[in-house]
Image (cartoon, rainbow, N blue to C red):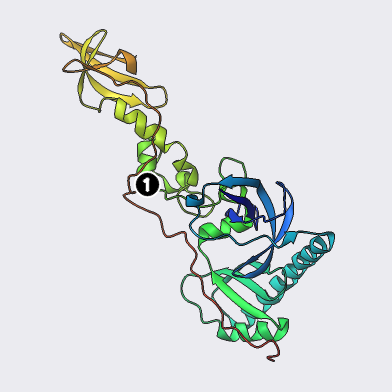
Amino acid sequence: MTTIVGVRFRNAGKLYYFDPGKLWPTAGDAVIVETTRGIEYAEVVTGVQEVEDGQLSHPLTPILRVATAEDARRNAENQVKRAEAHDICLKKIQEHKLEMKLVSVEYTFDGSKIIFYFTANGRVDFRALVKDLASIFKTRIELKQIGVRDEVKMLGGLGICGRPVCCSQFMSDFQPVSIKMAKEQNLSLNPTKISGVCGRLMCCLKYEEDHYEATRKRMPRIGRDVITPDGIGCVQDINVLKETVRVRIVKGDSSETNDYPLADIQRIGGKPAPAPVAAVENTDEPDEELLPTNETIIDAPELPLDEE
């Protein structure tokens, strides 16, 4: 068994695991850890727990220390510096007339690097911008181009439901979403109604997809003949949420259409509707995936600290 602790570096960010060593931080505590980007300030999300050794794909990095009052003060200073660096970078982007939109700025805890996140329609030649920023801040400058989903995750906002967007509240990773999910749920295919703030299909389409798929497998297809308590009829429509089937039954020269519970429907051949089963994980590949949501990372060349 291996002891681990889960931390996040930003709100709703991805969960990373570290080795607590002899420390015993609890959820809500701030800790100092070492990452590939340098020394970082993080918040503990899951307290100390044990997992099987086989669940770990690589050795864990130990936590350096539980954050002190001095660490908290330094982290607050970095937040102030972020705002200043953001304003300076905006001015430099305008001076160089670059077609890019600055989204966010991050300082590493030890101040060894400043990361600028931006969006752009294509590739941007920002070498001159990097030189200017390096001469001002006297530290390593890194620029990262991100997608529109990552932009909304960083900035936040309100969705069409009136609540804060999910990606900035609790979603640590983006799940694949396809137009097939909207069709399965009988939603309007109007892009303005099924798209989120980012302009892509809403992530919440994924939430109930497993239920829709499991329930649809139990229901007869539209156009098939079925046996109802009132006789044999043709399926006209199905309601997945209510688990009802609309059937048209021909009686002489007339016909009538009624809604029946799924439990009262029997398929031709004597096979009753299968009993409900627990929703299973969707393993089907989406037939129409969205634009890639992963980051396109562009590292700026490392410059000497004394470059002017």
Residue 192: where, in percent of width, then height? 47, 47
Question: Label 1 sits on what residue type?
Answer: Ile
Disc 1 target residue: 179
Depth check: give the residue in front, 293 or 162: 293
Depth check: give the residue in front, 268 or 21: 21
- Residue 170 in sight here: no
Residue 182: where, in percent of width, then height? 39, 41
As drawn, is 226 to the left or to the right of 92? left
Residue 91: where, in percent of width, then height? 68, 77
Question: Which residue lies at the image location 65% right of the left edge and 80% below the top edge?
Answer: 140
- Residue 109 in sight here: yes
Residue 215: where, in percent of width, then height? 36, 28
Question: Which residue lies at the image location 27% right of the left edge and 24% below the top edge?
Answer: 236
User: Does 141 appear above or below 242?
Assistant: below
Question: Which residue lies most toward the bottom here?
Answer: 308
Q: In which quarter of the image is the C terminus?
A: bottom right
